[in-house]
Amino acid sequence: MIPPYSRRDFLRIMGMGTASLALGPLLERCGQLRNSQRTPNIVVIFADDLGYGDIGVYGHPTINTPNIDRMAAEGQKWTNFYAAASVCTPSRAALLTGRLPIRNGMCSDENRVLFPDSTGGLPADEVTIAEALKTQGYATACIGKWHLGHLPSYLPTRHGFDYFYGIPYSNDMDDVNGWNYQSFFDPKIEYWNVPLMQNEEIIERPADQMTITKRYTEEAVRFIQEHKRQPFFLYLAHSMPHVPLFASESFQGKSKRGLYGDVIEEIDWGVGQIIASLHKEGLAENTLVVFTSDNGPWLLFKDHGGSAGLLRDGKGTTWEGGVREPALFWWPGTIQPGVVNDMGSTLDLFSTVCNLTGAAIPTDRTLDSMDLRPALFNSGSSPRQIMFFYRGEQIYAVRRGPFKAHFITQPAYEVDPERTYHDPPLLYNLNHDPSEQYDIAGEHPDIIADIVREVDRHKANLVAVEDQLAVRIEANGQ
């Protein structure tokens, strides 16, 4: 294995001055060989409220995303990839732990996400991807939105991340304007007193959201440059296109889609900066980059929310538009370009990354994560054949193979939205009907019976845990 010498060290050892620049190409090749022989770097870029139809390669006609589209052209585009929940907190907990939020208390029938007055967070005994990779000598960074507990004991630095730069919860929280719906359509930085943190310290409040996407990208590139000589895990969780929408000056008015498009195009620019940095540092062929989103578009906010394309409904629901997400996997020279129609989930990143890096997978708990390597490396199909869709602590829907059954349906964010219970459940063949328009339950009682048995097996394996989202500080401080 080539030793981890710097360019200057190499020239000194060879008895040459640092002016001997003719060795540049050889040294770059040496760096690439050295990097190819170590465990891969992992970069996860996680958008917030990005819809299935919001980027060019998934069909948006007016939002330009050349860098994300390039990821798809050079890597894999997955068309049946799911977030583990239709709202922020449980979705993020699932990605980082490989466990459905019902197993660790990160979902609730009382509160759908954590708030600035919440007292709970991701339990200390949960094992995150970052913690698993630390055992393999990885440098780890969480940049962007956390939303798994804002109190010190729950911050990223307590869950395996060496470095945190970002906001502790959603960018619309700490609202000082009385949650005025109209404020979101003419947003100003001072309307939301959300803090920007570095590690465990607040460094700016309110966060300047006009430049926050740009600064996340700059921090990500800096982290790559500083840790290029050791394996690293970068979790870049953008706080947009969650409302309120803000874009840097150079992106304002750029997109035909308006402000929402400006925001997406700035995120796309950031993807391009990260890919360029990996190429510049000779790391591209030893780095897996994943791009996806935490849940579907927030349709409540009209043109300030995104699009689920041909999928039904959006964020907050267990219809396809709330949970099916864009998903791109890029690893030049390792992942062959193509389109994958197999099922996958953000849950599966945990096992896939652990197996790629040699990190131990916990055996003392139930995981809901599956190893996607067969599909990624064209040696087989995805092992995921079933997906449980929770809203809070209740199973609303289940997909098994191409069929999806809805036991309960409910609007996303209406005041006191009414649940509708379905007996028999609604049934859709998503291969034929991805828009979930044509109920075929009457034609397939056998399939419904199989899905019901899967639900019974799943519930038999659940253990009651403390609800981390329910407890909030009362107005009087008690």
Image: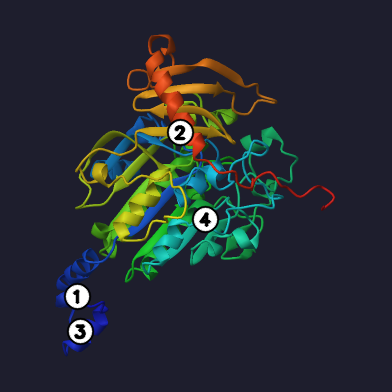
Asked which secondary structure carries label 3, the reply is helix
Mark 3 and 2 residues: CB-CB less than 8 Å, in contact? no
Give the residue pinned by disc 1.
2
Give the residue pinned by disc 4.
126
Q: Is residue 144 visible?
A: yes
- Mark 4, other Cα within 10 Å: few <14 / some 14–19 / many ≥20: some
- Spatial separation of the CA atoms under disc 3 and disc 2: 63 Å
Tell which of 120 and 186 is nearer to you.
120
Q: Amino acid at mark 3?
A: Leu
Q: How far from the left and from the top, in percent, is residue 204? A: 63, 61
- Mark 1, other Cα within 10 Å: few <14 / some 14–19 / many ≥20: few
Give the residue pinned by disc 2.
457
Q: How far from the left and from the top, in percent, is residue 320? A: 45, 27
Q: Is residue 82 above or below residue 232?
A: above
Mark 1 and 4 residues: CB-CB less than 8 Å, in contact? no
Q: Of tags 1 and 2, which is closer to the observer?
A: 2
Query: Mark 3 or mark 4, which is nearer the start of the sequence?
Result: 3
Tell which of 52 and 260 is nearer to you.
52
Q: Amino acid at mark 4?
A: Glu
Q: Is residue 318 above or below residue 433?
A: below
Q: Is residue 336 left or right of residue 305?
A: left
Q: Is residue 305 visible?
A: no
- Spatial separation of the CA atoms under disc 4 and disc 3: 46 Å
